[in-house]
Image: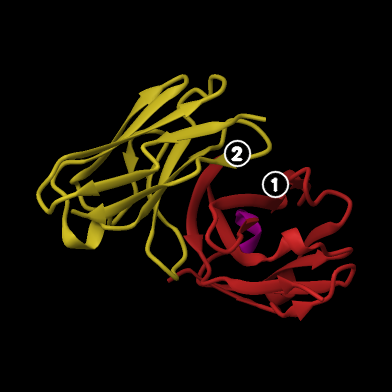
Chain colours: A yellow, B red
Amino acid sequence: DTQLTQSPSFLSASVGDRVTITCRASQGIGSYLAWYQQQPGKAPNLLIYATSTLQSGVPSRFSGSGSGTDFTLTISSLQPEDFATYYCQQLNSYPITFGGGTKVEIK
Amino acid sequence: EAHLAESGGDLVQPGGSLRLSCVVSGFTFSDHFMDWVRQAPGKGLEWVARSKNKAFSYTTEYAASVKGRFTISRDESRNSLYLQMNSLRTEDTAVYYCVRVACTGRDCRVFDIWGQGTSVTVSS
C-alpha cells in the first residue's frame, strides 16, 4: 500500500498568512494526488486534483505542486473560511489512500 | 446539478449486517465510477470500495479491511448505489460517504461529488 504522510498535522495561522502543507508518498505516485478541505461535520470538498488542477469553483488562492513522492498544497492568503482540516489522497494504485490530515486553526 | 443522498446508517451489534444506500441524481449514473469512503469518529478518511462504470463492466475493488465482508453494488434502474456490510466489527463504526468519481475517457481519478454521509455505529 502507498502511505501518505502529511505535515504538519496541526497548524496555527492568522488571516492573510501564506500556508503550505506537505504530503509525502511512500512510493512514486506520478501526478495522481488530490487535496480536500473538510469543515467540521461536513463532507470533504475537492480542492485540487492531478497535483495542480484547481477544481471548478475553488478560489485561486489555493494551489498545488509536486511530483513523484513530494507534494504541497499552498494557500496564498488564508481567509476565515479556510480554517478547516485538509487531506491529501493518492489515486495511483489500489488501495486508494489518504494522508492523516492537517488541521488549520486560527492563531 | 449532481446530488448524492445516502441512507441506511444505524446502530448494529457486532457480527450484524446493514445495507447502505445512495441515491444519485443530476448525472448519468452509468458513466461514473462510484465509491464509498468512511471516516471513524475523530479520525481521517478511509477508502472502502469502488464500483466501476459501465465501460469497465461495473467491476469492483475493495479495501483489505472490508474485503470478504462488504459488497458494493448498483441498480441502474433506481439510480442507486449500495454497500452491503456483513460481519460488522466495532472498528467499522464511522460516517460512510458515497462519492462520485469523474472520468476523462477511461481515466477515472477525480472524487468530485460527495454525499452528506450516513452514520454507522457497531456496538453491543
**Residue A2 horizontal/vertical position (percent):** 61, 29
Q: Dot 2 surroundings within 10 Å: few (below 14), some, or many (20 or more)? A: few
Q: Which residue is mark 2?
A: B106
Please provide the residue range marked out in magenta.
Answer: B29-34
Q: Between disc 2 and disc 1, whose residue precedes?
A: 1
Circle 1 chain: B
Q: Residue B54 vs residue A26: left or right?
A: right
Q: Position of residue A61 (x, y in %)?
A: 18, 46
Q: State whether residue A92 appears in this view.
A: yes
Name the residue located 13 percent from the left edge and 46 percent from the top edge.
A77
Residue B77 appears at what percent x and percent y?
73, 74
The kind of residue tagged 2 is Arg
Q: Amino acid at mark 1?
A: Ala
Asked if residue B33 lies in the magenta stretch, the reply is yes
The reply to whether the C-beta atoms of the residues labelled 2 and 1 are less than 8 Å apart is: yes
Observer-nearest of A27 and B108: A27
Q: Residue at x 57, y 71 (%)?
A: B117
Give the Cα separation between the discs numbered 2 and 1. 8 Å
Q: Which residue is mark 1?
A: B55
